[in-house]
C-alpha cells in the first residue's frame, strides 16, 4: 500500500465516501501530479475530491485500468 493510501482513506471517510477505492483516487491524482509529496494537506484533500469526481464520471473498468497503469491495484 502506498504511503498516500491511508491519508486518502481518511479523507474519503470524512467525506462519507467509504466505498470509493483509494487506489483509483490515487491514480487520478497522479494524472495531474507526478508526485504527491509537494501537496499541502488542503491541496491533497481538494485533489481527493477532484479525483472522486473523475471516478464518478468514468466506468469501473476505466478506473481499474488507470490504477493498474500506475501499479496501484487494490
Image (cartoon, grey):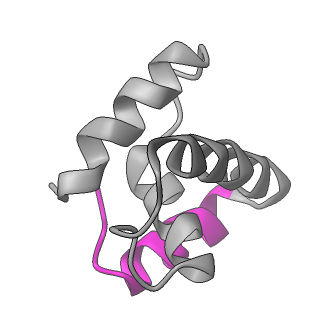
Q: Main secondary structure of the magenta part?
A: helix
Whether residue 69 is in magenta: the answer is yes
* Vertical relation: 22 (above or below) 37: above
Q: Residue at x 58, y 51 (%)?
A: 43
- 47 or 41, which is in the foreground? 41
17, above or below 5, in the image: above
Q: Is residue 3 left or right of residue 4?
A: left
Residue at 18 percent across and 54 percent down: it is 3
Quadrant showing the N terminus: bottom left
Q: Is residue 31 magenta?
A: no
On-image quarter of the C terminus: bottom left
**Residue at the image position 32 percent from the left and 38 percent from the top:** 7
5 relative position to 18: left or right: left
Q: Is residue 58 left or right of residue 34?
A: right
**Where's residue 2, x and y in %?**
19, 59
Number of marks:
0
**Residue furthest right in the image:** 57
Residue 31 in picture, x, y percent from top left? 59, 80
Q: Is residue 4 above or below residue 14?
A: below
**Location of residue 51 by image quarter:** bottom right
Q: Residue 62: x and y, percent? A: 65, 71
Magenta part of the protein: which range?
60-74
* Residue at the image point whose x is 53% and y is 35% from the top: 20
- Name the image quarter holding residue 70: bottom left
Front residue of 32 and 67: 32
Amino acid at each position: 500500500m502506498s504511503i498516500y493510501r491511508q491519508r486518502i482513506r481518511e479523507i474519503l471517510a470524512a467525506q462519507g465516501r467509504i466505498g470509493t477505492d483509494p487506489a483509483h483516487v490515487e491514480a487520478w491524482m497522479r494524472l495531474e501530479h507526478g508526485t504527491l509529496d509537494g501537496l499541502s494537506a488542503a491541496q491533497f484533500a481538494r485533489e481527493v475530491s477532484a479525483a472522486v469526481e473523475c471516478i464518478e464520471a468514468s466506468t469501473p473498468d476505466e478506473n481499474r485500468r488507470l490504477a493498474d497503469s500506475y501499479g496501484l491495484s487494490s
